[in-house]
Amino acid sequence: MVSDLRCFNRFYTCLIGLLDETLTHSAYTLTEARVLFELGRRSGHIAATPEGKAGFLARAFRIDFGPAASDIGQELQLEPTYVTRILRKLAAAGLTETRAGPDAPRGRVPSLTGRGQAALAGLQAAADRDLARLTADLDDEEAAELSDILTRARYLLGGAPESERGEPL
């Protein structure tokens, strides 16, 4: 089983270009794109930490990325300090801003700007085109079979159905 999973992972990683320097020939790495997606999915709403406090980095630099970095880091299994660096990079590029938020410890949460929403839409459209090309030669029966297999694999490996989590990149 382990060998089969590793074989499939190598095949799929190469097939969709996960090891490319950037995602879908954009200016963003896969991780940066996933952070953009998480911000877009959350619509500017980042819950406070259980203690209701900003993280150490947020307090030290007076930036309200602490809870956002922690939440996104937990979702993507990344270190909050790494997510904070990505959030700063996205903010410097004009893709994110902090806005008033009722649940934020200091009333501010990061969210996508119009430019950030356009960048995310472009990434999602490119990913959709790549996946459509990947499956273009499948007939309806094969496409349904592949969809069922992917859903079953996700279920067997303990993943929540995507309909419960939102549409990924």
Image (cartoon, helix red, strand yellow):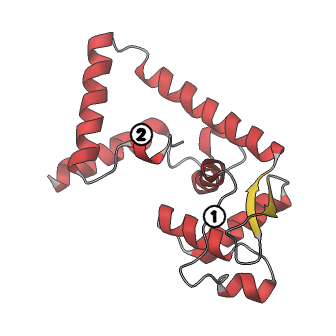
Residue 140 shows in this picture:
yes
Task: Answer above or below: position of 126 versus 3.
Answer: above
Q: Is residue 82 visible?
A: no
Provide the residue designation for mark 2.
Answer: 163
Q: Give, as a three-letter code, the residue at label 2.
A: Ser
Mark 1 neighbour class, 10 Å CA radius: few under 14, some 14 to 19, many 20 or more = many
Q: CA distance from mark 2 to mark 1?
A: 20 Å
Residue 105's x, y, as percent? 70, 77
Query: In this orientation, which residue lies closer to the viewer: 13 or 104?
Result: 104
Numbered badge on residue 17: none
Please identify the residue farthest to the top as the structure is shown. 139
Q: In the image, what residue occupies the spot 68% across and 36% down?
A: 121
**Quarter of the image where the C terminus is located:** top right
In the image, is residue 57 above or below residue 134? Answer: below
Amino acid type at image mark 1: Ile
Residue at left 65%, top 54%? 39
Label disc, if present, on residue 46 of the rendered structure:
1
